[in-house]
């Protein structure tokens, strides 16, 4: 007998769930905006870097290695090791390392998870409107 009483309540609850608006978004078809302060991929500005090495020293995951580029030591980021604590950004005296809003880092190649300073020097980096908002 008690099971018969549960059935109307179950049908009522199922009906309420069916007609509710979904909580989830259809990613990647609907682009999601990263909230302010969300810690994702690094943006490196080599023209601001003074080769002090504080980013390498402060990184607890050892995800930064200083490499020689054009006679200057610059950070090479290994995003597959990075824990996104952003101690490197906080320790940088010239603000050469900044947050970005690019959180789409899914890949099957580990080479795609490296931020090489040579890429920024060989071709000038253009900042997007989103990155300008984050830097300002």
Image (tube, rainbow, N blue to C red):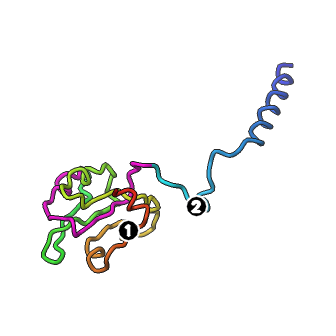
Disc 1 from disc 2: Cα separation = 23 Å
Residue behind mark 1:
127
- Binning the other alpha carbons within 10 Å of mark 2 as few (below 14), some (14 to 19) or many (20 upward) gives few
Left/right of residue 90 with respect to residue 5 in the rendered view: left
Disc 1 to disc 2: CB gap under 8 Å:
no
- The numbered dot on residue 86 is none
Q: Earlier in the sequence, mark 1 or mark 2?
A: 2
Q: Main secondary structure of the magenta part?
A: loop
Q: Quadrant of the C terminus?
A: bottom left
Give the answer, above or below, for where 8 lies relative to 59. Answer: above
Residue behind mark 2:
28
Image coordinates for residue 127, horizontal then vertical, percent: 38, 68
Residues drawn in magenta: 36-60
Left/right of residue 30 with respect to residue 80 in the rendered view: right
Q: Nearer the viewer, residue 32 or 3?
A: 32
Image coordinates for residue 107, horizontal then vertical, percent: 45, 66
């Amino acid at each position: 007998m008690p099971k018969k009483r549960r059935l109307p309540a179950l049908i009522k609850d199922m009906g309420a769930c069916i007609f509710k608006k979904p909580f989830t978004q259809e990613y990647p078809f609907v682009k999601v905006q990263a909230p302010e302060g969300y810690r994702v991929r690094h943006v490196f500005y080599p023209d601001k870097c003074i080769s002090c090495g504080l980013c390498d020293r402060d990184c607890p995951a050892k995800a930064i290695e200083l490499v020689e580029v054009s006679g200057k030591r610059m950070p090479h980021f290994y995003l597959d090791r990075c824990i996104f604590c952003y101690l490197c950004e906080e320790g940088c005296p010239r603000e050469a390392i900044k947050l970005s809003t690019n959180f789409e880092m899914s890949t099957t190649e580990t080479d795609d998870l490296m931020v090489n300073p040579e890429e920024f020097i060989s071709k000038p980096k253009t900042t997007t409107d989103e990155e300008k908002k984050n830097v300002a």
